[in-house]
Image (cartoon, grey):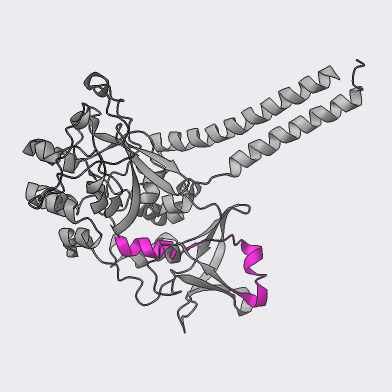
Amino acid sequence: MAAAPHHHRGHLVLLVLSLAAAFAAAADSSSHNITAVLDGRSEYTLYNSYLSETKVCDEINSEHTVTVLVLTNGAMSSLVANLSLANIKNALRMLTLLDYFDEKKLHSLDSGSELTTSLYQKTGQAAGNMGHVNITDLRGGKVGFASAAPGAKFQSTYTKRVDTQPSTLSVLEVSDPITFPGLFGSPSASSVNLTDILDKAGCKQFARLIVSSGVVKTYQAAMDKALTLLAPNDDAFKAKGLPDLSKLSSADLVTLLQYHALPQYAPKASLKVAKGDIPTLASTGAGKYDLSVVSSGDDVSLDTGLGKSRVASTVLDDTPTVILTVDNLLLPSELFGGAPSPAPAPGPAADVPASAPAPETSAPAPSPKAAGKKKKKAKSPSHSPPAPPADSPDLAPADAPEGDAADKVDSKKNGAGAAAVSFAATVAFVVLAVAASL
């Protein structure tokens, strides 16, 4: 067979190089890190620290297209002066728009005005459309931002561009926060009755267990510091094959319930990006009684080593406390590594969540010998940037760009880029091979 003309081979080589560049560029633009963008910009230090402490940074980073309106240290200080962390979190969400707006677009709005969705509106906490933001090109070249509430004033105005990643991330400085009556009315974790809120969330049997065992006091003591409660719903106690919890000793039951809580503030968006093993209140420090996270799209599941349980809903999100419901009981291999005793058939006198069945999704129980082999606990990345003077939880899944956390972020980006380049290299090999055979 005759060799392909040299100019054809040259075209193939150019095609291959273009493919490689395109895939590498796609990988580089597939994600962003808002705390990394703001890191080193001294005028936004306070704003950036609250992004990390409230975990709004994780919500921002999970959005493909987003505009972040940032406040200077002076404006941020005025905002946070008399607010709880839960209310500060909502203020930051109102300053996060789920569309791309750069300076050019701000000054070329259709009819000079546009209504867009904020991150706060997306949470479902907003009354009606109060979480939407009205952007209007005002006279004199100014652009104003206000709540969609009737009669809302444009107290917040565009100041300058901070950074952009075309079509995906725009960071703009504004003069003031965007607020409306009712924005700062979030319930405080310290003001709610834990068992009542679990009852109303459909976790009555779990609530009964934590009261009868006394673990409710452990949870309550942790709520002011940092707590993520993973509460199984009532259906979880009816799952087929659940071990007979009534056969557990009092100490083991306490350990099981402590396994359903994390000593850190980790809402669903933060769990979604968590890497490595996550310690629970039952963790011993030797990697025992840890959990890991498995994410797929918007779904987040917790893996115990014996099975997975999906995070179903958020019952309360009041920094530094979050209460999430899960579909299945979390069964640690340290307690249930052997073949579990099935629960007895429920009778009229059965009192317990304890005698309910286990998740159908649970993997078969490994032998005691295999269960003893547990992955070593990964080092938890630390928060960045530094949190404000208030008591700040040690947030394992933070994606802020300092120390080990930054290494993980860079590693993730590099991994995505490497995957794209690897794919492009494969395409190149195939094309060149075909060219050589011509």
Left or right, 21 with respect to 316, comes to right
The percent position of residue 217, horizontal first and vertical second, equals: 10, 51
What stretch of residues is rendered in magenta? Answer: 86-114
Q: Is residue 396 magenta?
A: no
Residue at the extreme top of the image, as rendered: 1
How many marks overall?
0
Quarter residue 304 falls in:
top left
Q: Is residue 110 above or below residue 123?
A: below
Residue closest to the eye, 26 or 43: 26
Q: Is residue 289 above or below residue 430?
A: below
Quarter residue 20 falls in:
top right
The percent position of residue 134, horizontal first and vertical second, equals: 53, 74
Residue 395 shows up from this direction:
yes
The percent position of residue 193, horizontal first and vertical second, equals: 16, 62
Residue at the (44%, 66%) spot, across then down: 121
Residue at the (18%, 36%) spot, across then down: 342
